[in-house]
Amino acid sequence: MNKRGVSPVIAVVLLIIIVLVIALIVYIYATEEVDEALDTATTFFRSHDFLVESTDLNHATIRNMDEKIEFNGHTEANFLEVFDVYINAVFYPGVIDSFTTANGDTTWDRSEVLIINFNETNIRKGDLIYLVYKKTATSIPFKVS
């Protein structure tokens, strides 16, 4: 019987090729999973565009420059379901008397103005107010003039 096996050099080369192919498959799978996870995170944490048009001690006028935002009514509780309110970096519910969209409905459409009426007893000139949109964590900072 004159049987010969594969030479040791060829065996090592074949093993290296097999390991490289397996590593390539794992790399491709992992990068696809990471890209998909990043796309999901980016969609969830994207910012929302707002434009503060005017502010004073009684109210603020803010334009929605992005997708529409739905409210369940016109009370402060309805506003606080969608936004957090901070005055001088302190969480402060109780500062909104009421709010209304330009159309008077509960949908704040793209390019539409929202008018927020403040409770003047809780706000002073020079206060820095942050409204934080909960869905995207986008803050709308403005100073009361």
Image (cartoon, grey):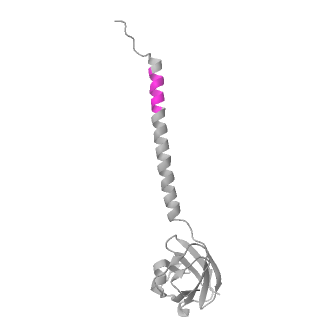
* Residue sitting at the far top: 1
Q: Residue at x 54, y 93 (%)?
A: 121
Residue 138 sits in quarter: bottom right
Q: Residue at x 45, y 32 (%)?
A: 19
Position of residue 120 measured from the top left corner of the image (x, y, whole percent): 56, 93
* Residue sitting at the far left: 1
Describe residue 122's horizontal placement relative to residue 111 as left or right. left
Residue 116 sits in quarter: bottom right
Nearer the observer, 123 or 9: 9
Residue bounds of the magenta highlight: 11-19
Q: Residue at x 55, y 80 (%)?
A: 108
Above or below, 139 relative to 75: above
Residue 3 sits in quarter: top left
Position of residue 70 measured from the top left corner of the image (x, y, whole percent): 50, 78
Q: Work out which quarter of the rendered image holds the C terminus and state it.
A: bottom right
Nearer the observer, 66 or 145: 66
Position of residue 36 measured from the top left corner of the image (x, y, whole percent): 49, 54
User: Does 101 appear in magenta?
Assistant: no
In terms of secondary structure, what is the magenta stretch mainly? Answer: helix
Q: Work out which quarter of the rendered image holds the N terminus and state it.
A: top left
Describe residue 87's horizontal placement relative to residue 18 as left or right. right
